[in-house]
Each structure stands twice: as structure tokens, then as C-alpha cells.
Image (cartoon, grey):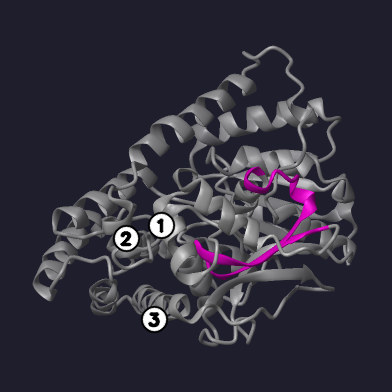
Amino acid sequence: MKTPQETKIVLVGAGGMSFGPVMVHDAVHSPKIAGAQLVLHDIDQERLDNAFAAADRLNRAAGEPVRMSATTDPETAYRDADFLLLSVEIQRFWGWKTDYEIPVKHGSTQIMGENGGPGGAFHSLRSIKTVLGICDTAAAICPNAYLINLTNPMSRVTLAINRATKFRNVGLCHEFHGGLARLMFMLLKPMNKISAKATGINHFTFFTQIDDADTGEDLYPKVRRHMEKFPFLHPPLVRHICNEYGVFATSEDSHIGEYFPGVKDIVGRHMNFRRFHQTDCAIRDQLTKWYGKGVFPPLPIHKLPRSMEQAFPIIEGLVTGDRVYLDGVNVPNRGYIPNLPDGAIVEVPAWTGANDLEPETMPPVQEDLAAMMRTQIEIQDLVVRAALEKDPNLAFQAVAMDPLSPPGEAACRRMFDEMMQTQKHLLPFD
């Protein structure tokens, strides 16, 4: 086993402002791997330069706990790598715009078009092509690296990695902690006083346990009372599912609505992806540039705590051999959720083990919701097969099967053909 100082970690797609800065911050706040080599890798030189300037400043302010470098050359980046962290997109917001607008024009009831619905199918095809291209390159250089995927659509990309590569891997998402933060404000308890577990498929997971960490008291009744007294504080779909099926979602309407039939009748509107781009991503991008250029005064950003992301807890556990608890990982189902198909990518708690992760076996998912998940799992399978077999007919079957697609096969076909023509340069069918 390598020592922490011998460990090499590569951030693939480090120029992305939703990924790179947070991962760098977590790296410099991971004392168990102090001295590790951290490589920022991106194919966009300008974005990589901006990301590295901010990362280098943060690392120096923290006393240089990691050895940091940046490169656009994949062979340099991947050589002797122990961990690859992937968050990659090509033409992200152009793709999202077409994923959203074209299906809606043809009658789709999708509200977001990122991970589910017909837009999510095309996003999946593009992401799988990109990620597996990276995996092909990395497999020849660092076949024993541990791959941590943060690329959406999480379930489908992670399924493709498991089917097409030999990398040990896991998919990670931070939605659990968003749900935990909502519970914190609802219950007026700090996060460390809430013992919670959730399960399902990514972006469609539900709390199976919400307890007081000190007394063991079941806090679910308080969650339901809060929803009854203050319904206006809860998104309509979250409230609907809790009332109808008795469980509280980790995600909000934007994500769980990507898989829920009839979502638009409940939510009553589409989600504004442009606002996400213009407010969150664009502002984060500008702030990172300013920080890297020293425009900010010497704010003690390096003293902020580590994020709730779980990539570096996994790395620490696997490098040191310590058992680390993880709130949610995306892995192939091996009986971890008894009433979901074997091999499907599911999201469950886990522990780090000696060489890999040890997922927990969870209770069966509430059956009405499990039926919706099984539909999505069939769609996942078709989309991944379409990408791996380069078969657009399988992709059309996936789109036609989606409950949020335009009504009727003819409308689906018109939408599908337009999407194929618009995005053909990024799809895996050439």
C-alpha cells in the first residue's frame, strides 16, 4: 500500500467551476493524505489556468499540504495515478438548452431535462461517450487507479463505467447532504445530531431513517407535522410524495421530478436551468478568477471547513485503511436494495474497506416508488446499451418508454429525430 505522500490524485475536468474549486478545497483540508500529489487536468487551457491560479493560492495559504500541478496532457496527468476524480462535460449549457427546449416543443412534460426525461437520455449519451473516451485513455496508463465519478447523469454514466471498464469505481452525489440540511432547519437540530439514512436511485432517494443521534428518537413524526403546519415551506412534489407514500425525499422537486409521472401537474412549472447557469455557475466562475488573480483581499478562505462531498473521505479511507462511513454511494446493486434489480446502479450508505467500498444492505424501497425506479432502471439499461452498442434504435426505445416524453410514438419520433440531428456531433453513434 502506498503512503499518503506517495499517493497521486487527478482531478479530471478541473476547469469546471462546480467541481475543481470544491475538490481542491477538500484536498487541502484532508490531513490524513498530507503530502499527496494533486494534479489538475483539463483539455481547456484557459479554464485550467484560471482553476490552477485559484487552487495554488488556496494551497499556499493553507501551508501547501498537497503537491500541486496542472496539465492538459492526459498521459502526464494519468501516469502513476491512484485516484481519478471525473466531472466532465462538453458544451454543457448548449447541450442542456437543447435537451430541455426541443423535447418541450414536442410535448414533453419534463421539468428540467438534465438526468431524466427525454433530455436526460441525450445528456446520458453525450456524457457516456465523453467519460468512456477518458476511461479508454486512462486504462492504458493507470489501469489500477480508483475512479470516482461525479459526472451526471450519475446512474447511467456509472452503469456504463461498470459495464465497459475494469476500473474499481464509485459514483458520488451530494443530494443526501442537501436533504440533511433541510432536515436541520426543519428540526432545529445541527446535522451531527441527526442520524439519517437514505436509499433509492440517484436523485430519486428517500430517507429510510431520521433519528435523534443522541436519544435514538424517531424524528419522522416531527418531519410530517412540520409539513402539515408549514406546507408552504416544502416544494409541492416533495410534499405530495411524503403525503402519499410516507417518505421524505433527499432531493427537491427539480431532481425527483425528472422521474415522477405527472410531475408538471403537481409542480405546475418548469425549472429554470438558465438561472442556474447565469447565477450559480457564472458567478462561481468569476469569483474563482478573481481569487486566483488576487483581486480579493486576503480573506481566510483556507480556514473554511471541508465540504460535505465524499470523494476525499473515500480517498482517506482507502489510503490509510481507516473505516470511513459514507452517507451515499452509487454502486451496482448486489442485494443492497432487495426489491430493485440486481446490477442496477443504486444509491446506498457504505463503509470504506481494505481495497474497495462495502455498501450496506437497506430495507426495501416503498413499493409504489420502487415501481417507478424499476421503470427508470430499464431506461438506464437501454440508454447505456445504446451508447455501448452504438445503436440509436435502443436510444429511441429508452425515450419512448420515458413517462415524461411527448405523448404518442409519432411525437416521440419527431422529437428524437430533431435531437439526433442537433446533437449528432456529440453522440456515440458515429
Give the magenta-colored segment's residue range.
185-213
Q: Is residue 282 above or below residue 102?
A: above
Residue name at image x 42 percent, y 53 percent = 253
Residue drawn at the location 50% of the way across and 68% of the way down: 155
Q: Nearer the viewer, mark 1 or mark 3?
A: 1
- Classify 10 Å Cα crowding around label 2: few (below 14), some (14-19), many (20 and above): many
Separation of marks 1 and 3 at Cα, in angstroms? 23 Å
Check disc 1 and report the residue beneath it: 237
Near-viewer residue (79 or 397): 397
| Disc 1: CA contacts within 10 A as few (<14), some (14-19) or many (>=20) | many
Above or below — where is 180 with respect to 63? below
**Circle nearer the N terminus (3, 2):** 2
Residue 39 part of the magenta segment: no
| Residue 140 shows in the view | no
- Which amino acid does the dot numbered 1 rest on? Leu
Residue at point 29% right, 48% down? 270
The residue singled out by tag 3 in the image is 378
- The answer to whether residue 81 is visible is yes
Q: Amino acid at mark 2?
A: Val
Residue that numbered label 2 is attached to: 263
C-alpha span from label 3 to label 2: 20 Å
Q: Quadrant of residue 376?
A: bottom left
Of tags 3 and 2, the one toward the viewer is 2
Please name the residue shown 47% across and 79% down the image: 370
- Residue nearer the viewer, 148 or 130: 148
Q: Earlier in the sequence, mark 1 or mark 3?
A: 1
Query: In the image shown, does 303 or 264 lie closer to the viewer?
Result: 264
Distance, label 1 to label 2, CA atoms, is: 7 Å
In reply to whether residue 195 is colored magenta, the answer given is: yes
Question: Can you give x and y, in whole percent of width and height, for residue 268 in the image?
Answer: 28, 50
Tell me if label 1 and label 2 are in contact, CB under 8 Å.
Answer: yes
